[in-house]
Image (cartoon, rainbow, N blue to C red):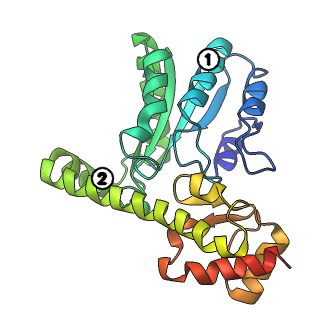
Amino acid sequence: IHETLFAAAGLRVQHYPYVGADNRLDVDGMLATLQQVPPGDVVLLHACCHNPTGFDLNHDDWLRVLDVVRARELLPLFDFAYQGFGDGLEEDAWAVRLFAETLPEMLITSSCSKNFGLYRERTGALIAVTSDAERLLDVRSQLASLARNLWSTPPAHGAAVVATILADEPLRQIWQDEVERMRRRIASLRQGLVEALTPYGLAERFAHIARQRGMFSYTGLTAEQVRRLRAEDSVYLVESGRANVAGLDAERLDDLARAIARVVQA
């Protein structure tokens, strides 16, 4: 969806490596590509729970990315759609806060669709950070013009729900607890699937699933294996091998593991 939106706005999109064929982060490849990006260009970064791969950068990785972004004078645009589903509400904001404390300007797109269960309300925020007060006024003016042309007066129901929860300490605590339960459930499903694959000798091959974060996973399954799962077991994945971990049934992980083993070991 990112590329479609940028293209519709008339922006030219280029890609940087992120995950290699071995189902591991390619941080060196990512940084080498960013080193070639012209100053002033925008670089899209996922703060946590990378969609679609599920692979997140660690703190050391983020520090390396920050060094390149700062040296090349790039404008970071953070996609922050899954706060709370990775390592926790505070932990997931680590990279965003690091960049905000260090760089003169950045953009953050934050969504309440998932962590507040308000998907159809389109509730979120575009946060512009700049150390230049005059530039901030220019940015605000441009955003106001865009908003006027897009929706003029947006629906406020979702925003009111979020504001009510965050402004009330008991409600805020209930929400935080619910997000944490969801985070733990997803992590448990990831670990459970890897354990269910162990009897088939596939735990090491799919160990990356347990290391990933968030709702989605690049499983490493091929398009042909995905088609067989769909045709023979009614298991549905995107042909890239991307799966929605949050949609798994904990009671049927053994069935899923059996089906995966059959198509992988055929």
At x 49%, y 23%, the residue is 99
- Residue 21, position in %: x, y? 81, 50
Q: Which mark is residue 196?
A: none
Task: Estimate the spatial distance between the alpha carbons at disc 1 and disc 2, rounded to whole Å.
Answer: 39 Å
Dot 1 lies on which element?
A: helix
**Residue 43 location, quadrant:** top right
Q: Residues within 10 Å of mark 1 (few under 14, many from 20)?
A: few
- Residue 170, position in %: x, y? 13, 53
- Residue 266, position in %: x, y? 86, 79
* Residue lying furthest bottom: 232
Q: Which residue is mark 2?
A: 156
At x 58%, y 59%, the residue is 216
Q: Which residue is mark 1?
A: 67
Taking the image as drawn, is residue 74 in sight?
no
Up/down of 155 relative to 31, above or below? below
Dot 2 lies on which element?
A: loop
Which of disc 2 and disc 1 is earlier in sequence?
Answer: 1
Viewer-closest of 108 and 244: 244
Q: Are marks 1 and 2 in contact (CB under 8 Å)?
A: no
Viewer-closest of 198 and 134: 198
Mark 1 or mark 2, whichever is nearer to me = 1
At x 36%, y 39%, the residue is 90
Q: Residues within 10 Å of mark 2 (few under 14, many from 20)?
A: few
Up/down of 146 relative to 62, above or below? below
Viewer-closest of 28 and 153: 28
Q: Amino acid at mark 2?
A: Ala
